[in-house]
Image: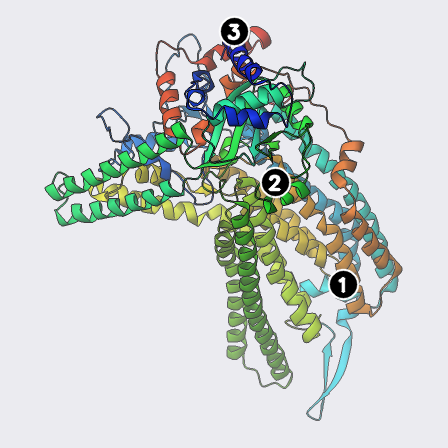
Amino acid sequence: MNQSTHKQHQSDMNDQVDQHGQGIHGQGYQSQQQQQSHPEMEKQSHPSQHQHLHNDQSHHQNQNHGHMDGNHEKHHAGNDHHEDHYNPLQMPCDWEIARKHALSRRTAQEKKKDPLKTLQIETCPCCGFEVDREDIAYCSDPMALSFLGSGFTLFYNYLRYCIIILFIQLLVKQLHNLYTNYNGSYCSHIKREKMEGHIIEEPYCPDSIFLRLSLANKLDNREALEMMQVLNFISIFIIMFVLIYFRKSQRQIDTTIDEEQLTPADYTICVKNIPTGLSVDYKYELKNLFENYSVLDSTKQIIVRKVVLVYDIEEIIELERKLDQLLQSKKDTIKQCNFNFHHENVKKIDEEIEHLEHQIHKIEEEYETHNTNFSGIAFISFDDESMKQLVLQDNPHTQWERMRSHVNRGRLKSLTNNDLQWNGQKLFLEQAPEPNDVDWEFIHITTSEKIFKRVRAWVYYILFESAAFFIIYLISHRLALLGDEAHEEELKGKLDEETKRKINIMSFSISMTIVLFNKFGVAKIVHYIVDDEKISNKTKFQISFVYKYALALFLNAAIISFLVDIVILKNVKGAGGFIQNESQIFVLNAIFPPFIWCVDPWSLCKNIWRKYIMSKGDKALLTQQEANKLMEEPDYLSAKRYSDVMKTMWFTFMYGTAIPLGTLFSAFGILIYYFVDYYNILRRRTVKESISIQLSTEMIEMLEYIIAWCAFGEMIMTYTFFKEVSKIDILLIVMAILYQQLPMEDISEYLFPVENNEEIKPYAEGSASFDTDYDRENPVTKHKALSEWNNRQQSAENPNPKNKKILAQQDEFGYAGDGHFGRR
């Protein structure tokens, strides 16, 4: 929308507003809405709201955790499949299109182009991503991933700081502990026990390097214990400061990337609690409302550039399930007809599929044209970021208001003229997530249903974790008893080597089974549970997943051993006891995740399956959409990576006092994990998520629990070994509690402010570099928006605006390309 067009349009709307005598912010708008519900008002068209189709569909992608990943591509072509038109249900599939799709989905940057020569750009017809890409060097800085958004660069910075924190703990405290433990002599002392009338002599601890390097080997050295407590206090104090600075580092990265990468969310807010069921043109009314009444200062000009409505798409989802059934029926019929794709029975099913596609297409048009099934949520984009910030600043709300509104079916009593409202319902405004961070399948879910789903998910999680905890507890308890019995038999001289070997094999097998169950089984089940919460935002989905998964891993790995070995059996330093078992877990935890992630059985299995399916040719019976999915690499899920690291950090700080060698294993384990994970995301994964800084901030909040776990572990281990609790241990517990209660993000911002030097650009200029947009991600509008965008990208009459951007960079900065990172 150019400025003159907007002014004329604004003038027309202002004239209409003046006719109704409505010129104030807030309450006066309600009567205006009722008068604008007449048919002649509804018929007004505003094509400018849909003219800003953008140009650079990089590697941001749609869905994340198994919802609707490409489901809404099924009816892309409607009922008009021309030969040269992309048909996602085409069968047999075109493997060349699928290969191009896979190339467009790679974690790679768009290849730099000569703006004087490149007028047409090849894009994937199903998703609009550019096909021509160049790999990111493995030795590159993670800032090279900034084109995916800040979330992935923040994750690798998160790993770096976890490694730094572990090495601080190692250098300040644990090296001294390892030295004094190794030079200790307690485990070599001989104890005499009477058993069945015989006096048996044996050392206090079994002959094991783990026990020799543990706290158990200096139980007779009080001076070393006191020094350990002092060093622990110093290391925790240093780590507290590092964590505060870590927050600043994450904000700095997010700000730098935000300055470099303009995205739709920079211009957009999410509006909730909009009245539904009104016979009005919602896009027009929302545009009018926000341009005339959304700020208190009437001299401030607000320009709305785009309005994207959110719809309840349950009806479409149900039709797509029927479409899946028809597709399966078509495959079965083709097999029965000896792979004759033109058989009469096959054509009959094709007609049914065509009819159902046409029905879905018409429903989408009806949704968009008549606002059918409008959910009361909209994304509104302004002309620049300052307008967005001003609107958000002038229209705050509280959680209490949202709760009251929910109870009163959207309405609030005692509204003032300063409250932005519509038909007695206060509009709740918030910063919009990125378009591909929205879960469009669940965003329309009502508050009541969300509450029910969240409560039910927690009930399922508690039941599952209780069952898993109890089963692992029984197995661990039985294994510990078996070890005690074997030890007694060995002292009596009745244990032969064959039985001893069988017991060791069984012990290792059970331990490995528990590790594998935690790694694969727990992750899968927690994923299903969180998926059932119907969270509308992928970042919030990731946060919920990490909380539940990391907690489950920590309980199964750390707390069970504490209960079995220390509380029940009181076997701390004996054979098969606490120190020996937890030392083995440290080793497995340091080696197993990086090793599995390096071997990557998921990619291996998919590669084997892909080769097998492709060898069938046309007999593979895949739709084009299924072939595209098959050619992609496996999906990357940040939440699982965060969970693995979180469990390691918690576990290490809780038991690091008793087993300082574990800190060394964990530090190098995460270091290896860093490089393996970076290689995988660059070469062996497809990224389908756009993660905001909110996930990183929540993960720092979780990471800060290491202070509490360290203090708790120090106190428990001191009491377990020495039957006392020192003043330093109590002081650490108090410090940990205070640290958790303080607003650390605010403190970090005060101590280490981050300056945002982002240049404010108008929407028309900023949109030239958008990777995606809300209308291209919205299942109801995406097919039309993507089709128009692809046509513009491939049209010689419309040179790629990105090339104009490159030329502008050459003139202004003396370089071309988007591979420039950091501040200019």
Tag 1 residue: 215
Measure the C-alpha gap from mark 3 to mark 2. Answer: 41 Å
Labels 1 and 3 touching (C-beta < 8 A):
no
Amino acid type for the residue under numbered disc 2: Leu
Q: In this view, does 218 lie to the left or right of 487?
A: right
Q: Which amino acid does label 1 sit on?
A: Leu
- In the rendered structure, find residue 112 and report the number of the disc placed on it: none
Q: Name the residue under label 2.
A: 695
Name the residue furthest bottom.
197
Measuring from the top left, give residue 636's x and y in whole percent.
48, 41
N-terminal label among 3 and 2: 3
Seen from the viewer's position, the closer of residues 120 and 87 is: 87
Res 565 → quadrant = bottom right
Task: Give the amino acid type for the residue marked by disc 3 in the picture.
Answer: Ser
Q: Residues within 10 Å of mark 1 (few under 14, many from 20)?
A: many
Residue appearing at x 65%, y 23% in the figure: 25
Front residue (pair 432, 406): 406
On screen, 203 above or below 313? below
Residue 371, position in %: x, y? 42, 31
Rounded to the nearest angstrom, the CA distance separating label 1 from label 2 is 37 Å
Instruction: For label 2, count other residues whose C-alpha is less than 10 Å away and answer few (under 14), some (14-19) or many (20+).
Output: many
SS under mark 1: helix
Residue 773 in the image, given as x and y percentages of width and height? 48, 26
Q: Which label lies toward us, 1 or 3?
A: 3
Label 3 sits on residue? 4
Q: Can you give x and y, in whole percent of width and height, for residue 205 in the image?
A: 72, 72
Quadrant (top left, top right, bottom left, bottom right) of the C terminus? top right
